[in-house]
Image (cartoon, rainbow, N blue to C red):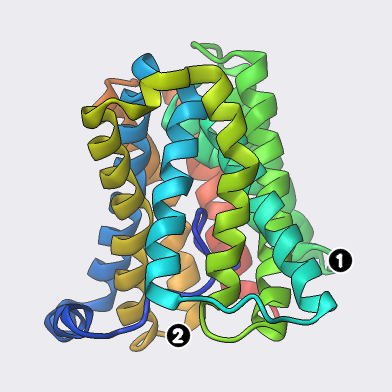
């Protein structure tokens, strides 16, 4: 598994200044595996909370507000400069478009199928990047194991809409592209400026869809408050936790821990949203988690 986190909002965590520095020192007393697990839970609880908004503003409206607030926070923190070369701007634009489409597809899938299923299918993107181009038989085995899990997941019955599966696959493809563009973003920009500008572009891409879909419902005070909470749970909290964990554990260990995300997503979906999965679906999630963890542990440097 590539240790880039979905959504989520970017490839670098927030700078440790002021209160963030104090929080970082407090987090230092927490074991790194617990920090990673807490970050995973935060992301999935944020997704579950976002799903609660679907009845009021739809999936497009929810993701539009999330990206809008994330962009505001990132711009306030990094204060990016627009003075960049043509190559850097090309990467930032590509990054922002892919980031926006990825989040939109994820939320469109989430509106149709359970959270655990969406995250499991979406994990095919990072897995493909991790083993892509390899000719080793072991990497082929991990790919077959993940494919078997997804086939079992989609053939095991339950409330799985075809459109939801297709949107989740589209999110997986975007996640793979996002990982590659994140690496390019790190080479062509400094600090979090490129990330902040990319997030602004992602919000610009998705906001018109959310406005057309939801209209003035987006301006309800309670909706804005919940959306801000989603942005914090899905971005600020997990990135801070991951930053502290990565200071103290090897990236491969971090990647293996991150491979637990589909299982955590299924548990959060059950606990928060009441989305119960059957034994075949749990077995499918186990296969994908095993493939992801195995690919991470055996990947070449």
Examine the rendering and report whether any part of residue 10 can be seen.
yes
Depicted 128 relative to depicted 227: above or below: below
- Residue 203 rendering spot, x and y as whole percentages: 56, 47
Q: Quarter of the image holding residue 58?
A: top left
Between 124 and 168, the one lying in front of the other is 168
Q: Is residue 281 visible?
A: no
Q: Is residue 43 above or below residue 184?
A: above
As drawn, the label of residue 133 is 1
Residue drawn at 50 percent across, 11 percent down? 159
Quadrant in which the C terminus is drawn: bottom right
| Location of residue 102 by image quarter | top right
Q: Secondary structure at mark 2?
A: loop
Q: Residue at x 60, y 50 (%)?
A: 202
**Residue 210 as seen in the image, left or right of residue 181:** left
249 left or right of 85? Answer: left
Q: How many marks?
A: 2
Q: Residue at x 54, y 18 (%)?
A: 213
Is residue 71 placed above or below 49 in the rendered structure? below
Q: Position of residue 122 (x, y in %)?
A: 60, 42
Among the two numbered marks 1 and 2 on one chain, the one whose residue lies closer to the N terminus? 1
**Callout 2 crowding tier (Cα within 10 Å): few <14, some 14–19, many ≥20:** few
What residue sits 43% from the left and 66% below the top? 74
Q: Is disc 1 surrounded by few (<14), some (14 to 19) or many (20+) residues within 10 Å?
A: few
Q: Nearer the viewer, residue 5 or 199?
A: 199
Foreground residue among 292 and 125: 125
Residue 161 position in % (x across, y down): 60, 13
Q: Secondary structure at mark 1?
A: loop
Distance from label 1 to label 2 (Cα)?
24 Å
- Residue 68, percent from left and from top: 45, 47
- Which residue was labeled with disc 2? 250
């Amino acid at each position: 598994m590539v240790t880039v986190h979905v959504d989520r909002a970017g490839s670098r965590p927030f700078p440790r200044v002021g209160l963030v520095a104090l929080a970082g020192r407090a987090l230092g007393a927490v074991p790194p595996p617990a920090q990673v697990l807490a970050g995973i839970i935060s992301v999935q609880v944020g997704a579950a909370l976002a799903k609660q908004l679907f009845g009021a503003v739809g999936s497009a409206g929810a993701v539009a507000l999330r990206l809008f607030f994330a962009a505001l926070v990132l711009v306030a923190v990094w204060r990016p400069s627009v003075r960049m070369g043509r190559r850097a701007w090309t990467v930032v634009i590509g990054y922002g478009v892919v980031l926006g489409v990825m989040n939109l597809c994820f939320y469109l899938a989430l509106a149709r199928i359970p959270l655990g299923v969406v995250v499991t299918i979406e994990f095919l993107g990072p897995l493909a990047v991790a083993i892509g181009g390899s000719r080793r038989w072991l990497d082929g085995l991990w790919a077959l194991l993940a494919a078997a899990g997804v086939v079992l997941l989609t053939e095991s019955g339950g409330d799985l809409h075809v459109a939801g599966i297709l949107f989740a696959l589209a999110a997986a493809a975007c996640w793979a592209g996002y990982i590659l563009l994140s690496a390019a973003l790190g080479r062509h920009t400094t600090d979090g400026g490129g990330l902040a500008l990319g997030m602004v572009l992602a919000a610009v891409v998705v906001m018109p869809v959310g406005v057309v879909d939801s209209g003035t419902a987006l301006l309800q005070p309670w909706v804005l408050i919940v959306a801000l909470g989603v942005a914090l749970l899905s971005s600020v909290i997990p990135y801070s936790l991951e930053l502290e964990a990565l200071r103290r554990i090897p990236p491969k260990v971090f990647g293996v821990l991150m491979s637990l995300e589909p299982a955590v997503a299924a548990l959060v979906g059950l606990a928060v949203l009441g989305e119960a999965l059957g034994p075949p679906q749990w077995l499918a999630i186990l296969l994908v988690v095993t493939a992801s963890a195995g690919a991470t542990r055996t990947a070449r440097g």
